[in-house]
Image (cartoon, helix red, strand yellow):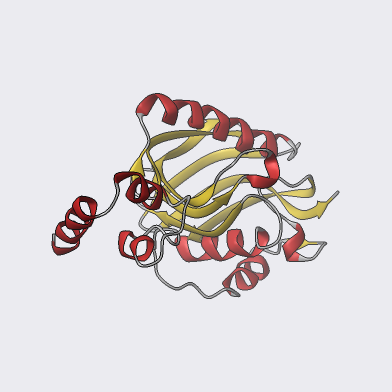
Amino acid sequence: MFKKIIIIIILLMTGGLLTLAAASGMVKVPFLSALLGTDKPKNLIGNVDPNLYKDTLVKEDITLTDEIGEYCLICDISYEDFTPMDVVVSSEELTSLLRATNSNLGPLKEIQVKLNDNNQAEVSAYLDLTDYGYDFSGPVYAAGSITKGGSSSLAIDLQRVEIGILSIPEKYIKQGEEGLNALINDQLAKMTDLKIDSLEISNNSLHFKGDYPKTATVK
């Protein structure tokens, strides 16, 4: 409540356009951006061991044949050695893996994933699209559900999206939802023998059962 009061005072004392720019996270305004919390992605789960992903890969006997920094969510990757798996991955393990594999390439940095209950999840990251022809870079946040879409696909339902601390209108959320589903499922389509028997998010974990590749190689 106190922070909200301070923000309201600042809104009244400073220029509206400057405050709006800082609130979006697209423009870094000294002191103001930090106070609004738009100088970095939203903190969802606190500090995560950056090397935790190594234990996860060993535990599930997964091999990445290239340097970890060569992998990202939009990278061209080939997959082999599909094997039945029954795996539980925590928010911390998934966050560590996504941060490590997107550290050098791709538009998303400083990713955090919070897995909740009833297939609900939250994601925050720093999104930089300047190398992809769009004049945008700043912190983003999304919340929604992740469910099994088909035998080898996911269905993502975005319920809330924020740029900085500004909520995105629903019609734009649905447009982003379509793009996100296409992006994720295009990557899954490269896993030619992927089979999703079940996928459940609950109690800070993602539980996957099905056939999953043990080896991934960057093309």
Residue appearing at x 59%, y 41% in the figure: 135
Quadrant in the picture for residue 182: top right
Residue appearing at x 73%, y 64% in the figure: 68
Q: Nearer the viewer, residue 21 or 68?
A: 21
Residue appearing at x 68%, y 51% in the figure: 106
Image position of 60 (left or right of 147) = right
Q: Is residue 152 in view?
A: no
Tell which residue pokes out farthest to the right in this image: 219
Residue 3 appears at what percent x and percent y? 19, 62
> Which quarter of the rendering shows the N terminus?
bottom left
Q: Is residue 192 above or below residue 48?
A: above
Residue 101 appears at what percent x and percent y? 67, 60
Q: Is residue 184 in view?
A: yes
Q: Nearer the viewer, residue 203 or 168?
A: 168
Residue 14 appears at what percent x and percent y? 27, 54
Q: Is residue 106 above or below residue 2?
A: above
Residue appearing at x 56%, y 44% in the figure: 136
Residue 51 appears at what percent x and percent y? 60, 75
Q: Nearer the viewer, residue 105 or 44?
A: 105
